[in-house]
Every structure is written in structure tokens, then in C-alpha cells.
Image (spheres, rainbow, N blue to C red):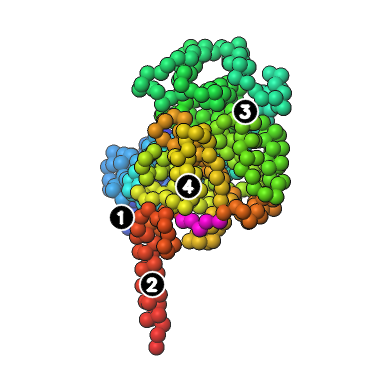
Amino acid sequence: MSMEEEYVKLIFGLKLRQIRTDKGLSLFQLGKISGLSKSYLNEIEKGKKYPKTDKIILLAESLEVSYEDLVSLKLDKNLAPISGILQSKLLKEIPFELFGIEERDLIEIISNAPSKVNAFISTMIEIGNNYNLTRESFFLAALRSYQEANDNYFPEIEAAAKNFMKAYLIDEKDEINEDWMLEILKEEFGYQIIFEDFSSELQTLRSIYKPKNKELYINNSADLNQIRFILAKELGYNYLKLEERLLTFSWAKFESFDQLLNNFYASYFAGAILLPEENLVRDMNRMFDINRFNPEIFENVMRKYTESPETIYQRMTNLFAKHFKINDLFFLRLSYKVGTDSYKLTKELHLNQHQSPHANESDEHYCRRWVSVRVLQDFEKVKDEKSHLLDAQISVYPFQNQNEYFVISSATVDPFNSDLLRSVTLGVKLEAAQKKIKFLKDPKIPVKKVAVTCENCGMENCSERAAHPKRYLKKLQNQQLNEAIDAFIGSN
């Protein structure tokens, strides 16, 4: 049975229950009036059964309402949000199966407590409106949650990448080069690959795919690392047989969650063939087995695989939990416009979900004590001399349970916009990582107290502060008021 039919059954059941309770009738009483059994009526109200026409007529007569009113999908204002959500395209696109949830389970929850569910839905809609929650941001959040639920490690894609390398006689010890990827795409998958200058309107894109004739257009302004990733990702789409897909890199829009999910799968595959699992794990072990932190070792490993820090930092997030038992970590990408004081968090991933910092929906100022910010400030001074700057620190969050993280960050010019700089950051919780990473005990690694935003920070005399701590002071004021109330009530 289609979900549309399930929704019709549920809405009919909600409406029947609403009319019955409005008239002050119990299921037993309605059963006596209509001649239908209490258990049958209960099944209808839970959305499990939809009565035939003769029984609907009988119910309409018993409840003294018209047949048309009873079968109408329109609910009154108290339950209208449920009807809208159930019939919306958004609900049908939510990837329940990724989280082990059956849509039938959702319908059962709604039918058991419609008023509470309606209040919850209304609250979520209001929060979404207040924070400008879009369909796009909702799906991106769902994808991040899926990654987090799997520790961002997907063994079936790792296996597919290894099988691909074997099938095309590529030794994992060797670097897969762009000429070989071009040949596979052309000869095996029938691609036409065209390098050309994109128009000014398309200049921020590095590639566009036309599915009708399998034409892949690559912008002449794309650098070698971008080209390698584009080709590896196209191999992922084809080798994994992913039909629903995005057509541009970087992506500009998507029509469904499947397109977004398949884009992630293809990107993961690309990372797995460009930075093979066994090779990178071996190099990570070598880095982590040294007692002193040496930024040059990190930079040498990066250059071995790619000139893009983002690619290697993200690939490491795939491998930490599986191979090093470190799943308390975060990845951030921060964007900065040269000559301004504007920093924007454009990408984030948190394993175990509770790591700081998280993106902040409101218009606040991210803590300037982050290494992610400092490395951008330092890189702005030397960007004409260097293509990449790396820095690290131990970040202590005194206002978030004293959590401590080793955080490493790399700054580069944004590959899609020369007016922007970007930093990519990898953070691991110190307590969880010290057993695996020897250099974390190096006393020369600087330690900094940090917060999430200036507005939420209670640090005194902070020279890097960019905004007044208004939210922290408000929270402190409320706390003091509550303590005063408790003291007054408890006094003799």
C-alpha cells in the first residue's frame, strides 16, 4: 500500500476521533450507536483500517455529520499542521530508512498522541521559521546525522574502492593519476570530457555534467587537485551505479535527498581511491608515534597525497574511529573575506554529536581564540608567499564542561573564490586521543581557553573579544535570580 493511502487512513482516523471526542462519546458509546465493534473503531482511529462506504455512512449518521465532512482530508486548525506535514513532499523525502525507522512507525506515533505530536510539529515549524530553516539545511543536517551515526566510516564503500582498484589493475601502493581516470571514464563508461573556459556566471563551478550524452565539462580554472577529485567522483557515481545525482561541482542545487546522499557516497569513494585506506592509516600511525608535535610531518604527509588540506582532513575523519578508536572529534571549514572581520562556518561534522564548537544559527561572533580563526589571520599576512599555513593548539572549553581538544587547522586561499580565505580544522578530544597519539603530551603545544561565540563567553579581559557577552550575562543574571528565589523560599 502506498504511503498516500496510509496518510488518508490516518487522517480519517484522526478526524473520526476528533468528532467523537468533541461530542463527548467514548469508543464504547459510539459502538453502541453505530453497531460497530469497539475494537474495529479503535483500529480505524489509529489509522490501521479504512471503512467501506456503507460503514462511513453509518458513522456519519451516528455522529450527525455529513458524509462529505467525514471523508474530507481537511482537519480543524488544532490538527491542521499534522495534515499538512503528512501530505507534504518534505515528509516523503525524509530518509527514515537510513536511521532504521519505518514510516509506519511514525504514523503509529502520530495516531497514538495526535495532540502532543501536533504541538511538537508546530513548535518545530516555529523554530524553523525563526532560524530560517530551509529544506536544504534540513537535508544537510540529516546527512550529517547519518555520517555521525556511522562514525563517518562506510565499509561497503571502502570495499568497493578496493575492488575498483583491483579491477582496473591499479596497485594501491601507487598513486592513481588523472590520465588513468580520464581513460577509464572515456573507455569504460562512455564519457566525453571537455575542458573549457566557463562563462562569468558559471565561474565559481569547476565542473558541469550533462547526463544526456555523458558530457563532463571541466572549467579550465580548476587546479590539478580539483580535477583529480572531479574525475574520482565521476568514477564513484558510475562504479557504485548511483543514478540520482548532482550535476555540478561544487553543487549549486539538489532536487531530492537521494541526490545529496549519492553525492556524499561518490565523494567518499573519491577519497577512498585518492587516499587509500591502508596507505593513509600507515602514515597516520607514523605521525602519531612521535613524541613531539612537528607540523612539517603533517605537511609532508599532505603533500604526499594532495595539495588540498580539506581532502586529507576529511579523509582522516573516515579513519579515526575505525582504526584508532577515536570517535570524539569534529571537522570544521571556516570562510573569511579578506580585509573584514567576518568569519562564517560553512561546513561541520561532529562524531558523538556533542563536540564543541557547533555552528551558531543566530548572528553571533565565533570565538577569535580558535586556531581556525588565528591561522586565517596569520595566513592573510603571508598568502602571497605561501600557499598553505598550518597551526595547532589545545583548546579548553571552560564554559562547556572543561572539555579539551587537540585542534589542527590549515589555511589556504578559497579554491572557488580568490577574495576569500578558508581554514579547515580537525579536532580530537584530548582524553580519548592521548592513548593513540603520543605527541599530544608535548608541552610545547600551546593551550588556549576558548568559547563558542563571544556573546556566550564569560572570559574576563579577553583581548580577542569581538562582541559584548550579552547572552552569557543574561544567563548569569537568570541564574543569580533563581538562586535568590530559592534562598528566599528556603529561609525561615
User: Quick one: quadrant of the C terminus?
Assistant: bottom left
Q: Which segment did they paint magenta?
A: 447-451
State the separation of the CA atoms marked 2 and 3. Answer: 55 Å
State the separation of the CA atoms marked 1 and 3. Answer: 67 Å
Of marks 4 and 1, the one in the foreground: 4
State the separation of the CA atoms marked 4 and 3. Answer: 30 Å
Image location (x, y in percent) of residue 130 = 33, 48
Looking at marks 4 and 2 on the same chain, the residue that comes earlier in the sequence is marked by 4
Looking at marks 2 and 3 on the same chain, the residue that comes earlier in the sequence is marked by 3
Image location (x, y in percent) of residue 353 = 53, 50
Where is mark 4, residue-wise?
Answer: 374
Give me the disc on residue 274: 3
Q: Give 480 or 42, whichever is nearer the viewer.
A: 480
Helix, strand or loop status at disc 4: helix
Looking at marks 4 and 3 on the same chain, the residue that comes earlier in the sequence is marked by 3
Of marks 1 and 3, the one in the foreground: 3
Where is mark 2, residue-wise?
Answer: 480
Q: Give the class, few, some or many, for how many residues have Cα within 10 Å of label 2's Cα (few <14, many ≥20).
A: few
Q: Main secondary structure of the magenta part?
A: strand
Which residue corresponds to the image point at 47% horizontal and 18% vertical from the top-left? 220
Note whether 268 is above or below 439 in the view shown: above
Q: Give the class, few, some or many, for how many residues have Cα within 10 Å of label 1's Cα (few <14, many ≥20).
A: few
* Membership of 40 in magenta stretch: no
Where is mark 1, residue-wise?
Answer: 23
Looking at marks 1 and 3 on the same chain, the residue that comes earlier in the sequence is marked by 1
Amino acid on which disc 2 is placed: Gln
Task: Report the side of 4 relative to 386 (left or right).
Answer: left
